[in-house]
Amino acid sequence: MVRFLVRRVLLGVFVMFVVTIVVFIIFFVGPGSADVARTLAGREATPKTVALVAHRLLLDRPIYVQYWHFLDGLLHGNLGYSYYHGQPVTTILKQAFPVTLSLALGAAVIWLVLGVLSGVLSAVRNRSFWDRIVTVIALFFYSMPSFVLGLLLLYVFYYQFALHGIHLFPGAGYTYLTANPLKWFEGLVLPWITLALVSAAAYTRLTRGSMLDVLNEDYVRTARSKGLSERRVIYRHALRSALTPVISQFGIDLGVLAGGAVITETVFGMPGLGFTAVHAIENQDLPVIIGVVIVASAAVVVANILVDTLYAVLDPRVRLH
Amino acid sequence: MTETGASSHRVAGTDKDVLVKVENLQKYFPVQTTSLFRRNHDQVHAVDGVTLEVRRGETLGPVGETGCGKSTLARCIARLCDVSAGRVIFDGRDITGLTPRQMRPLRREMQIIFQDPYGSLNPRRRVGSIIGDPFALHGIADGAERKRKVQEVMELVGLKPEHFNRFPAEFSGGQRQRIGVARALALRPKLIICDEPVSALDVSIQAQIINLLVDLQREFNLTYIFIAHDLSVVRHVSDRVAVMYLGKVAELAPAEDLYQVPRHPYSNALLSAVPVPDPKKSSDRHQIILIGDVPSPIDPPAGCRFHPRCPKAQERCATEEPALASVLGDSAEHVTACHFPVEKGEDLSNTSRVSVPPSGSQTT
Amino acid sequence: MSLSPGDIVAIEKVGVSAGVPPPEGAAATVIEGRSPWRLAYERLRRDRASMISLGVIVLIILVAIFAPVVAAITGHGVYEQFRTTGLSPDGLPVSPSSHFLLGTDDQGRDILVRVAYGARISLIVGVVATLLEVVIGTVLGLAAGYFGKVVDTVIARVIDIVLSIPFLLFAISLVSISHPSLTIVIVVIGIFGWAAVARVVRGQVLSLREKEYIEAARALGAGPWRIMFIDILPNIVAPIIVYTTLLIPVTIVIEASLSYLGVGVPPPTADWGTMISGAQQVYQQAWWYLLFPSAALLITTVAFNIFGDGLRDALDPRAEQIYK
């Protein structure tokens, strides 16, 4: 078990290493060193600043020296300095992270519960009226791009409500939990629903499919023929195996979200990691872009490791691989 | 003509008569290691020093329990896997070290019929295409010509030629095995290795297929290596039988000789386990029950492999491995690897077993 | 107690036909096999929902192809800005009317025409990028699964890395350091998308690799590429087809998302994502600007998803089973 874990972590480290190389190549090697300095310094910079930046970043040195410098900085937790914002990247990210976290975790709870429950119910009452309704609704929301859903929700619950004097949800922005819990919550409702509904639909489909597969297995048939009540069969025997792929997908999705729910944040104007990254790209603020990309990749890698470990704990066969 | 055989027995011939020869063949499989850091040196000794020949036109029948190495031996001969040590000589040519590319033209001369009629045919391909593969692969025939040849061989094996556009799922088990035979026969190879071709079939169908194989052998002068674990099947089909145990040959003899006068205690045990239809004869028999399980092929017993389970084992058996040779006045065709071979009429079921502790073997 | 094979052989020699009894009066008629494809096709045809969505898809394709006709009929070009007729005195979009059937956008352009042209982008990117991903993914997945060892390790690691990269951020980054264009969008989506396909294909190949008919093919002397494409591929082509059909709407949404974020096909090209992004500024005054491109997007993706689901059910023999 320990060996398995060590292997997975080493693999994760290797993947991150390659990601840093890819990031480095895209941003530092691609445009050419003159452009890099200028880009890093920001659009507003004077030639003098640009030269200073170039020198400080060792851009006149060979590539592997630059890479080493870059990597070294990373390992010491230094993600660079944003000339555009005038702040270290780490600070910027630290501010953005709680936003993404609130959004992601809240939505995750909703979609997991909603998705799994509807999926299980649908599978158990397969081919019934309920099953069909749930399947249709799930397909509808699964097909919907999140920004479309977000905008529609804004239109109805923000704009139309406001027209009728109801000011329940803000149109954009974010309030920190520590500042005003109620406003924090209000501001998150619509984004949560947006993010959750689309993902829930995917989970409904996933759970339903997985559950149907399991319910068809021989050992479930055996459990039934033993005379166990249907409820017991479902909850104790079938659900456990059916949920394994769902749990692993959940872990990965969380990991991906931790890097920023780019679209939802943009629609609702929430300054999370994704939103920050998009604006950084618009402003050519390279250090921030690189910072977010690295954090996001790390989140995915960590999530993958956790999910694989969880899988190995639940299913001993995996450890023998 | 005896009641058992359609094929005639061959006596020892000259080298020109030998189609396949294996010399001290060894095939080891490394055991899968789970660790990244510790290299596991355990190996499964699937085939551990086998020397045999197969003569033209004859049927050699390797028999033994699961895991004795007969399938692996066949695959080594067909060069479907690499050989760990020893040599394989086919039609006078050493094919041990040949690359897949070099082997390719030789594959026209040797073919395999597999055990599982459901697994050995690609379910997504039409039967005509499956049987046509050999022609396609070796550039023999194309288009209409190929179709004609495919239908020709289908008829040879007892299938209706108009079915060549069907899928394997539409055939019964026996018919599918016929398809497998057709595929093997297509290029009129010299050697056909039959890897338990009837084990997965119902008994009545088994008879049909065996009959077919025997007829084809006569018509096309084929040489067979016929692997089976059902001794009554082997007896019917084979000229010579090789009893295998844990990767080595325990006894090699013409079929009738083996069934009348088995010399190796293991052969005796196998034969005593064959069900006899006549209830009276059956109850009169004394079955030899072997003690213990088949040892692990990763760490086989020292000396004679069979000694931990052998009713006749003595001290010598635990230390000295017996060589394959004629014993007790047998002809040169009948060889046995045993220090204390069984005399004719000797009853092993009554022997009180001298307990020889297994040395160097692993018991699970 | 059954008869020994020897006795049975004797009985059999009397002559029992090996095959199915021939049809009445049939000479040497060639009998067509009922292929699994034909069965699946028939199942699909019976599925009303799938057939309807297929019709919708065809309709969308037609709209995309005949978008210029739509422009001709309405008399409004796709890039034409009607600043006087198309915008209100305040400079806001005009609502749907007999003049502009679906209203105008913030620049006075006819939304009906732009939605029609937008279908082109969505479909082209959706189909081309998906095909690109599937082809690359299938070939690499086949190679990884079949060759194993070094090839597999390398490809599997590359898949891991590609899947660990946050797609949206990288896509945005890549587009931003280059010139945005249709080709770039397709390439960027394709570069990241093949990994998921490859992983699925690899898994399928691994499960098939040890089958006896593969060994039989090797025994016949077939080379690895022949085995992969003639023996393995037909057995995995069904899941690949389903995956492709379900991947198209995902690609369409990704393209729309990229455009929404401003890194898709550059303006003034008509694109549903770009239009929705533009609509976000004025939706309070011009709901039609938000509604129609969104509806077009939604209808397209729903249609593909329904059809994809139907295809999966048709190709999956387990669909015949009766549960419970």
Image: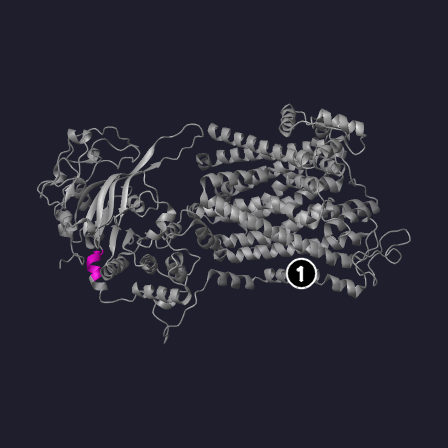
On the image, which quarter does residue C65 sit in?
bottom right
Q: Secondary structure at mark 1?
A: helix
In the image as oriented, which residue stretches furthest toward the top?
A76
In this rendered view, identify the residue nearer to me: A183 or B101: B101
Q: Pinpoint residue C39: horizontal percent, then vertical percent.
A: 49, 62
Q: Residue at x 16, y 53 (%)?
A: B10
Q: Pinpoint residue B56: horizontal percent, then vertical percent.
A: 22, 53
In this rendered view, identify the residue nearer to me: A48 or A155: A48
Q: Residue at x 61, y 44 (%)?
A: C191
On the image, which quarter does residue C113 sit in?
bottom right
Question: From the viewer's perspective, is residue A289 above or below residue C21?
Answer: above
Q: Is residue C37 visible?
A: yes
Which chain does tag 1 point to? C
Left or right of A240, for residue A159: right
- Dot 1 corresponds to which residue? C61
Left or right of B282, for residue C82: right
- Which quadrant would the N terminus of chain C be assigned to in this image? bottom left
Which three-letter amino acid code belongs to the residue tagged 1?
Ile
The secondary structure that dominates the magenta segment is helix
Q: Residue at x 46, y 34 (%)?
A: A319
Magenta-colored span: C2-9
